[in-house]
Amino acid sequence: MNKRFFVISSFLVMLFLVFTPMALAQSPTITVSGTLINKTTGEPAPAGIPLMLHTFDNDQMSGMIDGVTTEGGAFIFEDVEAPANRLFEMMATVGKTSYFSDVAPAPTDGGALELPVNYFDATTDASGLRVTQMHMIVDFFSPSLLQIAEIYIISNDSDKTVEDAVQLPDGSTAAVQFDLPKGAVNLSFDQGQIGDRFLETETGFADTFGIQPGAETGQIIVRYYIPYKDGVTVDHPLSYPTERVNVLLPEVGVKLTSDKFGLDSTREIADGRTVEIYASGDMSTSTNFAFRLNGEPQLGQNADIAEPTVSVPISGTDFRVIGFGILLAGALVLAVGVWWWKRNPVDNNEPMDGYAIPVPTDLPADSPENEIVQALLDLDAALDAGTITKQVYERQRETLRDDLKAVLLRRQKPTVPDTVVDR
């Protein structure tokens, strides 16, 4: 073979092998544009409003591209990659509220994609707010520990977004504030963290995100613990007009009684257990509700199951996905609150509210539970002091959490205080 021909052929083959995958990997691009409009006034938004273009692949967010509005509320994103089946959504942040466009695919002809976004003026008048649905999912981590998740579906009957309607004692503001039953500890949220979107208060929590106008435009999911004993009464304040409340209780030998609720139905959930659904009547004029729980929970293996997925109820007792799985079981370890409150150190002589995990209170100082809790606190201190890395901290924390869970589950009847202390 001619040497020159061999060299040229090899070079061409190499170029083919290098550039063909690159060409195949290139995705078509599109232009995404639109206008941000104030629906309260009908006027376009001013320039400089922050935007973010979200992309989704296989139902998962795959990218975010920042931008801002220009004069007249217009925006444009050029040369945006648009592989097959990708979806696009525009988000605009005005004040303390995020507004979204519809989710749309790229045009099949590769042209421009229009994603207009609407927003509203803000108001501090919360008189138009109402809770159209409240769902309270009750379960047991141990015979002495009640786990509760609450889902609020909120409507705003005004034509403005409710922001900063609540003035908190520290001078901060929030859109809405909800009270919880006395003794609720270790609050956590599905849509944010305490100190970020959500703020903990003396009687419950506040949400800083605005509530937009319209039916069922707001949603909050909060989880917490309270001590349980046979015959306990759960007394729950209502912070806003609430149309109906559903209480979901697994069939574990505990019965619910209340003059506000009646047994509506029973359903089998994903983990094989049966859930009793208690429904209230119209509570629009009520300021609170209460129910009593009687019986010793028979947990079996359910005290150590993984945390199931929560699906959001749609109306009444009809659920988009009934696989609640009694959403709080198992994976939320009793020590979950310990490291969350390390950002708020307390004086040794003051009540350690943040550290009030439901560990029995009459245990000796050298009990395994107290030793593990102290180890968690020491671990937090070591991280703050910089003597251990974040990776070591996370690994040791998970080990201690598992240890504490195992110790508490071995106790047949962990004790809890007879009286619930005010938070």
Image (cartoon, rainbow, N blue to C red):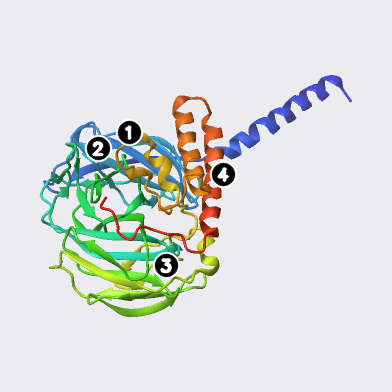
Q: What's the CA distance linking mark 3 and mark 2?
A: 39 Å
Residue 203 in sight here: yes
Most foreground residue, 96 or 251: 251
Viewer-side label of 4, 3: 4
- Give amino acid for label 3: Val
| Kind of residue at disc 2 | Ala
Name the residue carrying label 2. 74
**Earlier-in-chain disc, 3 versus 2:** 2
Task: Give the Cα distance between marks 4 and 3.
Answer: 33 Å
Tag 3 and tag 2, C-beta contact below 8 Å: no
Q: Residue at x 22, y 77 (%)?
A: 259
| Sequence-first disc among 1 and 4 | 1
Of the two numbered discs 1 and 2 in the rendering, the one whose residue sits closer to the viewer? 1
Residue extending furthest right?
A: 1
Tag 1: Cα neighbours inside 10 Å, few (<14), some, or many (≥20)? Answer: some
- Quickly name the residue at label 1: 67
Residue 225, numbered circle: none
Neighbor class of circle 3 (other Cα within 10 Å; few <14, some 14-19, many 20+) is some
Q: Residues within 10 Å of mark 2 (few under 14, many from 20)?
A: some
Q: Which residue is mark 3?
A: 321
| In front: label 2 or label 4 | 4
Look at the image and tell me in which quarter the N terminus lies. Answer: top right
Instruction: Say what secondary structure mark 1 lies in.
Output: strand
Q: Earlier in the sequence, mark 1 or mark 2?
A: 1
The alpha-carbon separation of the residues under discs 3 and 1 comes to: 36 Å
**With 395 as the anchor, is 98 left or right in this view?**
left
